[in-house]
Structures are given as structure tokens and as C-alpha cells.
Amino acid sequence: MERPGAGGINSSECENVSREEKMSEEFEASTVDSLVDMPFATIDIKDDYDITDVPQLHLKTNEENECIRKDQIKKRKKKCKYYQPNYFLSVPITNKGITKGIKILQNAIIRQDKRLAEAMVGDGSFHVTLLVMQLLNEDEVNTGIDALLELKPFIEEILQGKHLTLPFQGVDNFRNQVGFVKLAEGDHINPLLEIAETAERTFQAKGILAGESRSFKPHLTFMKLSKAPWLRKKGVKKIDPELYEKFISHRFGEEMLYRIDLCSMVKKKQSNGYYHCESSIMIGQKPTGIRDLINEALHRERMSRKSKVKQIKELLLKPETQAKIRRELFEGRLINYRDQANNVDFSATLT
């Protein structure tokens, strides 16, 4: 099976983008500020997920299309720089040993500084992010679901029937603003990076605005100061590495990649603290529980309904269908008019 090529955008006439080039720094600042309430801190999105990479464009290289190509790249850079992600691909952390270890880490930090309790990530939300994206409406969400389903065979091709185990060891931070558990080095890194790159291409091929950081660094966030911006007023401006010094080389455990979720950053979380999940794909042969069976059944039912609705929409958009509907509506109104006229004539006869 061939994997999707890098995502492109439809070619169009050269447009004037000078207005975009004059966008003020205030706009960029307001965009970053609006990310504070999302599951990824500003530092996660802007620094760790700096979405400035430009998808490769499969355009002709002749002089006639050169102007179009340059304009599209410039426009795409602007969009990627300023777009606000609201969905992401998540590898959920289900190993209770890892969760327990992180809770011990969090409590150890809180004992040293109680103010940081407000910056801790809930244990139900622990995950590794593969890709962030923007889905603005129901149709785009459905397109994202389709892309996720198409991603599964590509992942299985990458893994070649093998399990991908992710070992977590040690603690680090991003610019002293986000604390995370590190993914240990090993042979698992390359296939995980390949999965992330394939996911990006698959979603971009569907026309979805999606992109990762310049250098994808998988990690497991356990605290971030952006969750509680008021801490700055209390004097908490950075995460002191000494707070987690005892956990620098701590082994937290291993997570087997068996599920990837398409999650919302903004919709209400589930009762267990995990993000709202639009759809999931199962990877490998992890033992299936009752809940997984129920979710799989619901997913199949939803996909079936979605397929039927799509078929109905396509049928209604056909010119011959629309012409038939108009004809039947016209004939129906004509029959009603004739019936009414006959009733009037019959009443007049009786009188």
C-alpha cells in the first residue's frame, strides 16, 4: 500500500497577500493568549508544536506556474503560523503504573510548593500527542475521522505486525513552563516518528490544516503553568528543576501503542478526565474489554449512519434528482389546484 504524499493545496490565481504581511504583532499575541485554556499550554503549541512547516506542493515547475507556487507557499506560511489548533491525535496513557508514578511525582512537587497544585494535569488526561490540527465544523470533523481510519493500514504497514512499546523514563521541561515525563531513547523512536509523519501527510492530503513541531518531540505532560496564569501574580514564573530532581532518571513504566484517538481540545471532557473523543483506531492485538467492545460497536454504527447520510447528500445534489423533485412538487401543486377547483365547481352545482 502506498502511503499518501505530502499534502498540497489547490492552485489558484495569484492574489495580493500584502494585507496578510502587514498583520500586527498584536494579532499574534492575541492568538497565543487564546490558547491558554486549551489542553496544550502556549509553550506546547507555540514552542513544542510550532506550526510553521509548509507542506510540499506538487505543482508544475514551469515559469507559468512559478508565481502561483510562490504565492501559495507564502500564503500557507501565514495560515500555518496563525492557525489555532482545536483537535489532536492522542496516544492515551492506560498503564496504571505510569499514572501512579506521575501522581507520586506531582505530589512530591506540591509538597515543596503547594501553589503548583493548580498547574498539575489530571491523571485522566495523560497522553502523548502525535499531531495537532484545526477542524472548524462537523463536515471537517467527519473528514478528520475518515483520515484517521485511512491512517490505520499505514501504521500497520510501518509496524509489520510488531508491537510498539513506549518506555517512559526521566523528567524534563520546556523553557521552565511545561513539565513532562520523557520518552526513553531506543528502537521505538523511529517507528513512532514515522507514524507521526504519516499521520500529518494523511490528514493534509484530506485538505485539513494540520502540522507538528519543526522537530517532533514526543513527551508526556504532567504540569504546565499556563493552566493557572494567575500564579505569576503569586510569584510563580517558572518551574524549578530542583522540584523534580529525585525523578530525573526515574523509570515510570511502558505503554504499548494500541489505540490512537481523535480528540477535541475545546469540547467538554469525559467523566474520567480524558478528552472528548470523536473516533479511535485500534493498533495491534491488545486484550479487548467490555468498554472497548461497546466503543467499537458504537463507532461502527456511527460510521454506517454517516455513510448513509453521505449517500443521501450526494443523491440530492445530482441534477436529475433535483429536477425530479421540482417536477413532482409542481405536479403535486397542480393536482391540489385542480382538486380545489373541482370542489368549488361541485359546490356551485349543488346550490
Image (cartoon, grey):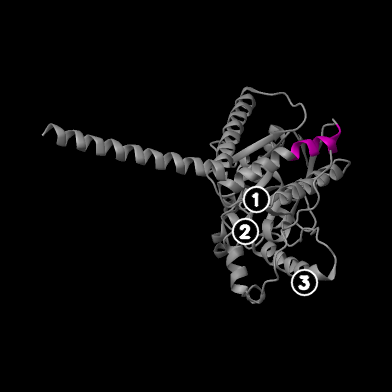
- Residue 225's x, y, as percent? 62, 57
Q: Secondary structure at mark 1?
A: strand
- Residue 198's x, y, as percent? 79, 46
* Residue situated in front as seen by the camera: 122 or 160: 160
Label located before the other in sequence (3 or 2): 3
* Residue situated in front as seen by the camera: 195 or 43: 195
Q: Secondary structure at mark 2?
A: loop
Q: CA distance from mark 1 to mark 3?
A: 46 Å
* Residue at the image point whose x is 46% and y is 44% from the top: 326
Q: Which range of residues does the magenta coloring cover?
A: 151-160
Q: Which mark is residue 223?
A: 1
* Residue situated in front as seen by the camera: 308 or 226: 308
Is 254 located above or below residue 170 in the figure?
Answer: above
Closest to the camera, between mark 1 and mark 3, is 3
Majority secondary structure in the magenta region: helix
Q: CA distance from mark 3 to mark 2?
A: 28 Å
- Residue 196's x, y, as percent? 78, 47
- The residue that label 3 is drawn on is 67
